[in-house]
Amino acid sequence: MTLASDDKPRWTRKHLLSLEELSADEIRVILDQADAFKEVSTRSIKKVPALRGRVVVNAFFEDSTRTRTSFALAAQRLSADVIDFSEKTSSTNKGETLIDTARNIEAMGVDVIVVRHGAAGSAHYLARTVKCSVVNAGDGAHEHPTQGLLDVYTMRERFGKIEGLKVAIVGDIANSRVARSNLWALNKLGAEVILVGPPTLLSRSFEQLGARVVHDFDSIIGEVDVINMLRVQFERVKSSQFPSVREFTRLFGLTWDRFQRCKKDVFIMHPGPMNRGIEIQSDIADGPQSGILQQVTNGLSVRMAVLYLVTSLG
Ligand code: CP
């Protein structure tokens, strides 16, 4: 990050790989750029020429609805050419490696590879190998930087600031890249983060990353401004970590009874996809204090900002 002639921080990164490595100023640059792009989505013709002639490839080696669609739409709104690459129909099924796949995609003159992969560190690995920009769309349980960004963007929109907010992130922390990216961004921007979950899914080691670790949801329910409920990742969770769905909902679900004990203006978030009735009750997810669809809407502006900034260097 350098300062522009008007003393405003200027973006200098070719890749977006994690929020751990960004400074607070860099995060603010992305959020402010997203603010500028939000207006584009309200126009009758929802396009700007910022990435005309550029090529963005969505390379998803794991399932996705929100992130994949949002990146594709973000690139299209910036007038880029977009290619959707899916593992299920690609030559990775014939044994081609991630790196060979990426190098072959890059050889077609691609400017940005947006990658989601089940292995932590895969986006960093790719960025060291290819010459184009790499954007991490989720790497294993490590990070999901654009989800973290759209979450803090949505909180900033709701409260006007992040500094001083008390944010609870609740549930399957151990398997959550969303929790990690949120924790980095919120800490850097001056919020207090409380991680809540059973000891099997939330170790005390998170305290070293600057979070308060709590195993009793009810003990903090009345003091937080934001509750970000995480999806229980049944595809990743081990049976020894998770005794029963009923027990989890009783102790860590956002039930109507718990919601009644929250602050009056508590803001409810969830990155999706939701397990309705398990980590969150449906009428709370769909209620007036829920920002869940607002998160999805904001994801578009945030991803436009990220694509725009990583390609702005050359
Ligand atoms: N929040 C999120 O990453 O959702 P998808 O898995 O649908 O992209």
Image (cartoon, grey):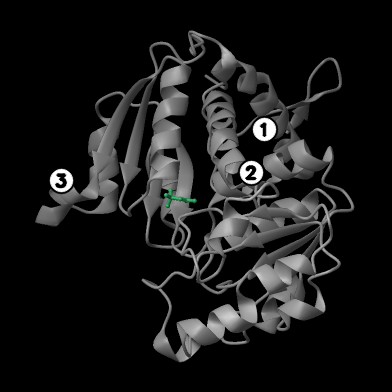
Instruction: Say whether disc 3 or disc 2 marks the residue closer to the N-terminus.
Output: 3
Q: Is residue 244 visible?
A: yes
How far across and how far down the image is residue 96, in percent? 17, 52
Q: Which residue is mark 2?
A: 149
Q: Is residue 210 visible?
A: no
Which residue type does callout 2 highlight? Leu
Instruction: Say whether disc 3 or disc 1 marks the residue closer to the N-terminus.
Output: 1
Q: Are marks 3 and 1 in contact (CB under 8 Å)?
A: no
Whether 226 is drawn above or below 246: the answer is: above
Q: Which residue is mark 1?
A: 30
The residue positioned 69% from the left and 39% from the top of the image is: 153
Measured in 3D between alpha carbons, the distance from the residue under mark 3 to the one under mark 2, in whole angstroms, is 30 Å
Whether 257 is drawn above or below 46: the answer is: below
Q: Which of 28/102 is in front?
A: 28
How far across and how far down the image is residue 32, in percent? 72, 28
Q: Is mark 3 within 8 Å of ligand 1?
A: no
Q: Are marks 3 and 2 in contact (CB under 8 Å)?
A: no
Q: Which of 282/72 is in front?
A: 282
Q: Which of 148/143 is in front?
A: 148
Q: Which of 149/291 is in front?
A: 291
- Dot 3, how many residues are within 10 Å of its Cα: few (below 14), some (14-19), or many (20+)? few
Measured in 3D between alpha carbons, the distance from the residue under mark 3 to the one under mark 1, in whole angstroms, is 33 Å
Question: Which residue sits furthest left?
Answer: 94
For numbered disc 3, what is the local secondary structure? helix
Which residue type does callout 1 highlight? Ile
Q: Are marks 2 and 1 in contact (CB under 8 Å)?
A: yes
- Residue 187 placement: quadrant: bottom right
Q: Which residue is mark 3?
A: 89
How far across and how far down the image is residue 39, in percent? 63, 17
